Image: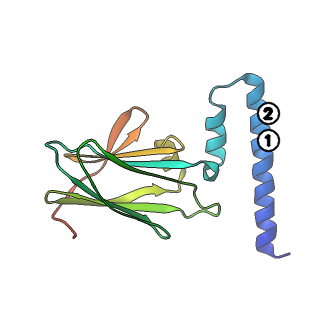
Amino acid sequence: MSYFCKNVIFFILVQAIAITLLIHSSSCEFNKGHHDDINKLSPWLITWHLHVVNGLSNGRILLVHCKSKDDDLGIHNLTADTEFTWKFKPNFFGGTLFWCYMAHSNFHAAFDAFRENDDFFQECNYGDCIWTAKDDGIYLRNGKLDKLTYGWEQGRLW
């Protein structure tokens, strides 16, 4: 058996034991945050939902093009107060990345819509990333608040 296979099996066993211990300890306490703890332990087990929302004023159309290394989600023209959404499970071995290009009027922004790191997982509440394009930039919903994350740049790339 190769060194890589042994490491993968060891990693899976450690995760299974940790999840079992977490479920057992949480079920005894009837803890409402039980599933959140499991999600924090194993973010690749979650079905992630990404949303891109047109929150621009004056009925402006938002051009959205999101993709990953493996999937091009196409070009979408969102009318005011509509959204484009998709769901996926991250690659078990890591490296899942989605990025988006957005444009309206004479402005554009390009950014990582999903990346694998603990800070990002927490910002997206371990499963639901909501990006909103507003007049002054791109916001990421963190809990019940929108946080300005990226500004618009002058001009359009295409």
In three-dimensional space, the C-alpha distance between marks 2 and 1, rounded to whole angstroms, equals 6 Å
Q: Is residue 71 left or right of residue 79?
A: right
Residue 34, compared with residue 43, is above or below; it is above
User: Which residue in the protein does label 2 denote?
Assistant: 24
Q: Residues within 10 Å of mark 2 (few under 14, many from 20)?
A: few
Q: Amino acid at mark 2?
A: His
Residue 23, compared with residue 10, is above or below; it is above
Residue 2: x and y in percent read: 82, 76
Residue found 81% across the figure and 54% down from its top: 13
User: Which residue in the protein does label 1 denote?
Assistant: 20
Q: Residues within 10 Å of mark 1 (few under 14, many from 20)?
A: few
Element type at mark 2: helix
Residue 158's image quarter? Answer: bottom left
Cβ–Cβ under 8 Å for marks 2 and 1:
yes
Element type at mark 1: helix
Residue found 76% across the figure and 28% down from its top: 27
* 102 or 37, nearer to the observer: 102
Residue found 42% across the figure and 64% down from its top: 67
